[in-house]
Amino acid sequence: PQSKLRTRRPLEPELLAACSALNDLLISSGETVGHDTCGGSGDIDWSTLCGSSDGISAQQARLKAEAELAMAQAEPMARMQLQIERSILPKSLPNVFQDLSCVSLIELQKVQQDLLDRVKGFNEQLVGCLIERDSLQMEQDSMLVEVEDLTRYDCTIFDNFNKYHFLCEESLQCVKTVKKT
């Protein structure tokens, strides 16, 4: 059976129409907003959106108008999207009830038993995979502990080597100073 899940189509034409309506609204107040502020392609002109010349209240009013327009357009756009998705689905689904009414009870029991056997097999396979996953996780954890121990051991050896090297250097310095005197 084919999956009923479908990816959603972007609503770009509807968003562009909403941007045009927003532009019309803002043009009447002497301002404009390009398509790039409403989900179109291109870079956003941040100086237009966040310019200090407008003031915060003007920006807030512009954003409020944009949000109200988007909310007003949301329901019609959702209905349109739903109609498009409904038109994609097949008009008549196969009538399973009529097909099964022609089958004898014994055949239905065989189908049921076959399905139960398949479910049991899948469950056993799932249990095996889960056990293997747990085993691999335990193995990974033990490897991480070993790596941590080796790293700690290497650090200890390196520290001891540095101490030994420092002591040797110090001893050499002492010997050199003794020979000079």
Image (cartoon, rainbow, N blue to C red):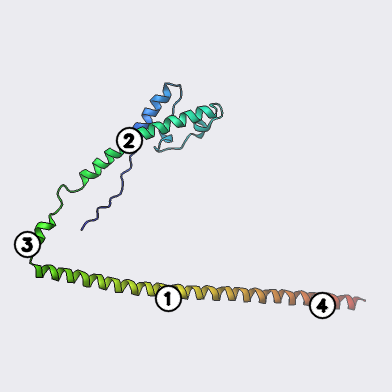
In the figure, is residue 159 to the left or right of 111? right
Q: CA distance from mark 2 to mark 1?
A: 52 Å
C-alpha separation, residue under disc 4 versus residue under disc 1: 53 Å
Residue drawn 25% across and 44% down?
A: 85
* Cα–Cα span, label 1 and label 3: 49 Å
Residue topped by disc 4: 171
Rounded to the nearest whole Å, what is the CA distance between mark 2 and mark 3? 49 Å
Q: Which mark is residue 102?
A: 3
| Residue 87, quarter of the rendered image | top left
Q: Residue flagged by tag 1: what amino acid is it?
A: Ser
Measured from the top left, where is residue 26 in percent x and y? 43, 25
Where is mark 1, residue-wise?
Answer: 135
Question: In the rendered image, is residue 35 in sight?
Answer: yes
Classed neighbour count for the residue bearing mark 2: other residues with Cα under 10 Å, few (<14), some (14–19), many (≥20): some
Question: Label 1 neighbourhood size at 10 Å, few (<14), some (14-19), many (20+)?
Answer: few
Mark 2 lies on a secondary structure that is helix
**Mark nearer the viewer, 2 or 1:** 1
- Along the polypeptide, which appears first: circle 2 or circle 4? 2
Closest to the observer, 154 or 114: 114
Front position among marks 2 and 3: 3
SS of the residue under disc 4: helix
x, y percent for residue 70:
38, 34
The residue tagged 2 is: 14
Is 102 placed above or below 118 here?
above
Q: What kind of residue is marked 2?
A: Glu
Three-letter code for the amino acid on which mark 3 is drawn: Cys
Q: Earlier in the sequence, mark 2 or mark 3?
A: 2
